[in-house]
Image (tube, rainbow, N blue to C red):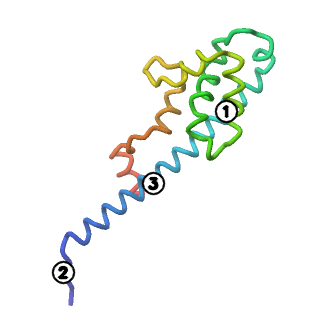
Amino acid sequence: MRMHLPSSVFSGKADRARIRAEHVIREDFLVEAMDMVELFCDTVLARFGMVEHLPTLGEDLAEAVFSLVWVAPRLTAEIKELDVVSSLLIAKYGAQCANVAKESSVNSPVNTTLMLKLGVEAPPKALVERYLLG
């Protein structure tokens, strides 16, 4: 004998599944963002001689520096050292560096993928569907 359940029972489960999928996506985005931050730190470290000796920010370091300054307040709980790195970069390149990094405009020198990964918007519905389908 088959029992018939109201569709509302299943829709509640579907909503919970979507919320959980969004949570998994945000966690994946966080891991991807941390990988990017590690790459930017490696870039600054590899070119530390330039940071130390050149008074202005070179174009080849701009994305890494601005991205690290931008991401520091967003990942301080996960990576406490980012605050120190950000402060040192701002001390080296000036408060204007911090101001430019904080504006999230289209022309911002901050890496756009990093901004998307740590954005506050809900993940795209198509991506949630792909996660649900497995």
Q: Secondary structure at mark 3?
A: helix
Q: Earlier in the sequence, mark 1 or mark 2?
A: 2
Distance of mark 1 from mark 2, alpha carbons? 54 Å
Label 3, on which residue? Answer: 23
Distance of mark 2 from mark 3, alpha carbons? 31 Å
Quarter the N terminus occupies: bottom left
Q: Position of residue 59 (x, y in %)?
A: 63, 12
Viewer-nearest of discs 1 and 3: 3
Quarter the C terminus occupies: bottom left
Compared with residue 53, is residue 22 higher up or lower down, i.e. above or below? below
Q: Earlier in the sequence, mark 1 or mark 3?
A: 3
Label 2, on which residue? Answer: 4
Label 1, on which residue? Answer: 39
- Label 2 is placed on what type of residue? His
Q: Residues within 10 Å of mark 2 (few under 14, many from 20)?
A: few
Number of numbered callouts drawn: 3
Distance of mark 1 from mark 3, alpha carbons? 25 Å
Residue visible at 25% across and 65% down in the picture: 11
- Label 1 is placed on what type of residue? Leu
